Image (spheres, coloured by chain):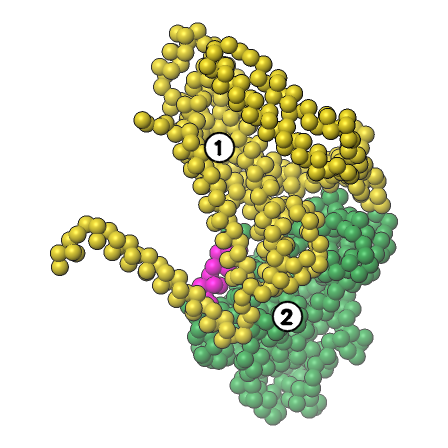
Amino acid sequence: MKQALLSICAAALGLTMAGQASAASTLETVKARGKLVCGVSLATPGFAAPDDKGRMQGFDADICRSIAAAVFGDGDKVEFVPTNINTRFQALQSGEIDVLSRQTTHTFSRDASLGLDFGPTVFYDGQGLMVPKSLGVSSAKELTEAAICTLPGTTTAQNISDFFRAINGKFELVVFESPDENRAAFYSGRCEAITSDRSDLASIRAVANNPADYIVLPETISKEPLAPAFRQNDSQWGDIVSWSVWLLMAAEEKGITQANVDEKLKSEDPDVQRMLGATEELGKMLGLDNKWGYNVIKSVGNYGEVFERNVGEGTKLGLTRGPNALWNAGGMIYSPPIR
Amino acid sequence: MTFLHDMRFRAYFYQVVAVGFVVLVGWTMFATASGNLAKQNIATGFDFLTRPAGFVITEAAIAFEATDTIGRAILVGIANTVKVSLLAAFFGTVLGLAVGIARMSRNPLLARLALVYVELLRNVPLLLYLFLWYSLIILILPPVKQALNLLPGVYLSNSGLVVPAAFVESGGYALLACLLGGAAAAFLIRVAATRKRVATGRSNHGGLIALGVLLAPVLLLWLVNGFSVNWDFPTAGKFRLTGGLHVRPEFVALLFGLALSVSANVAEIVRAGIQAVNKGQWEASAALGLARGKTMRLVVLPQALRIIIPPLTNTYLTVFKNSSLAIAIGYPDLVMVSNTVMNQTGQAIETIAIFMGVYLALSITISLVMNWYNAHVALKER
């Protein structure tokens, strides 16, 4: 709490002091600083959490790395700033961070009223509900009158309220600031169900004593397209963020991986040549090195690799690709043509 | 330049300069912040308070629906904060008074026990205690399906205590009027009886008469007119008990934690107050033949009260501010509701300004009330 207040004060102070953020373009600022400052979550395994060597690991962290690689040719020129869920937008507005890559849902009111813009969706998520199997419930609609635990974060409280209003059912909402208390209350039976984004439910289930005792109900009660955000009115910077993300997706489509990117430089495919900067000068149009595409893939791999490494079936979260598969494999991951 | 050496002029001059400086700094910060926000196309202002909240607050001291405004949601937060703080201050004071007196006991076991109690509570952060009480409640008590049926209609589980609720169906206002009228009359009779006892030196049955006057109007109303009370008994629903009055574990854990922390502080304040009363007062009472208990009640405590009140004000301010730890264990106080609002609207600066303003206003109110009471009991020098 105290930390939240402090960071809000710092952000407020930043707003009062710093008007210079809008003076120089973000790209110039980042280049002059020599590193990208990227806002991530405090500790969310799979999305952004330091490993035992202190290196930030996770899906969101790798998005930061891909942008740094596009700008500097080196994915490690990133300073990760853990942002609080309440102050993340202020941190971006005040210029404390250059990009916010923090499981942030792209919504209308955020886009329109917070002085920021969103890049392409990097992860299609949705709010779900998890219950113990022993409850004998197979649909969220059967949960009227139940107690439901949740975190105050994002719009989960509003979504679950909307869901039950739509089916005209009452329920008891218990909101926790601390994820640990939230989990403990659910596992002890204080609440019949727990609600959060499906990816988050997967990580909550992963730490249960016996994960097989719990099921995630089929309903997805909200759309949560997670996307990186950047300050409004800087379209050059916005293009760099967006195309760094799209490049990851295009690379998967073309079968370019971290391992074979050097061979692919000699590929005959004109699309691949353009993406990796072997021909034409696409990078320069963004104000970047012409090898930007090569650098991005060399440091983090393609979208599929980023997904599998951090949240895929081989990890603790064990998520399937689902809607996050490529468009030609039944998913929604689709990049505009890089040409 | 002689007026520069005028004491009165200088006193006012420096004050005006200081206030002017503070106002200038505040205004500059406000102007720059709102200018920067406008430049970055960030919504400002308090218009969001009239938008529908869209989220549910289950534990609400005043009625709240998801369709109500964000402003009302914040009001619910304020009401919840005030409710738990007042109750914690009350129970904490009663308990603290007892423990403080126990600290002074001549029975070594009791005195040591009270010492251990105070030190344990004072030296561990309140937040850890809140986690402890809450975990104990939700881990030790059974889930709601296997709720303990203590009395008919009374259930205890890790979802809280559920008791039958009483609703006055008709004659509610008459009942309220009888209750208030009876209480007022009883109070007046009690005061008059005490005054008479002091004047005449003879004991009378003022307390008993007052009790009769307190209950008579309600009984009379019941006999003459009758009012129907509807009992809402909890019944087992699909997942949990429906109906009845719910006391939720989040509220209980917070009330418990706050009240215990208040009691430890009050105990120390009371002990200090008692020790500050001159030993001669004890000896004089003993010489007059007063027993130890009566000495404490009639001679020492009234004098200790004057010393106790100022630090007690601090304790009450602390419990009120500490209630914001509610957020850790899921009680929807002002800070938690504000956090949800912040997440939803993104207008952190305005929301923080509101809750800081509310805490400031309520703290000042507490201080004013306590200062008034302090002036009331202070030694009046004539």
Q: Amino acid at mark 2?
A: Ser
Based on the displayed image, in which of its 4 quarters is residue A310 positioned?
A: bottom right
Q: Which chain letter goes with mark 2?
A: A
Question: Is residue B192 depicted above or below A296 in this figure?
Answer: above
Observer able to see residue A77: no
In terms of secondary structure, what is the magenta stretch mainly?
helix
Answer left or right for B158 relative to B96. right
| In magenta stretch: residue B24 | no
Identify the hue of chain B: yellow
> In this figure, which residue is indicated by the disc labeled 2?
A109
Query: Circle 2 sits in a helix, a strand or a loop, which is it?
Result: helix
> In this figure, which residue is indicated by the disc labeled 1?
B265
Percent x, y for residue B38? 50, 73
Instruction: Tell me which segment is drawn in magenta.
Output: A4-16
Q: Which chain letter goes with mark 1?
A: B
CA–CA distance in space, label 1 to label 2: 47 Å
- Quadrant for the N terminus of chain B, please: bottom left
- Quadrant for the C terminus of chain B, please: top left
Question: Is residue B49 depicted above or below A282 in this figure?
Answer: above
Percent x, y for residue B178? 67, 31
Q: Nearer the viewer, residue A262 or A313?
A: A313
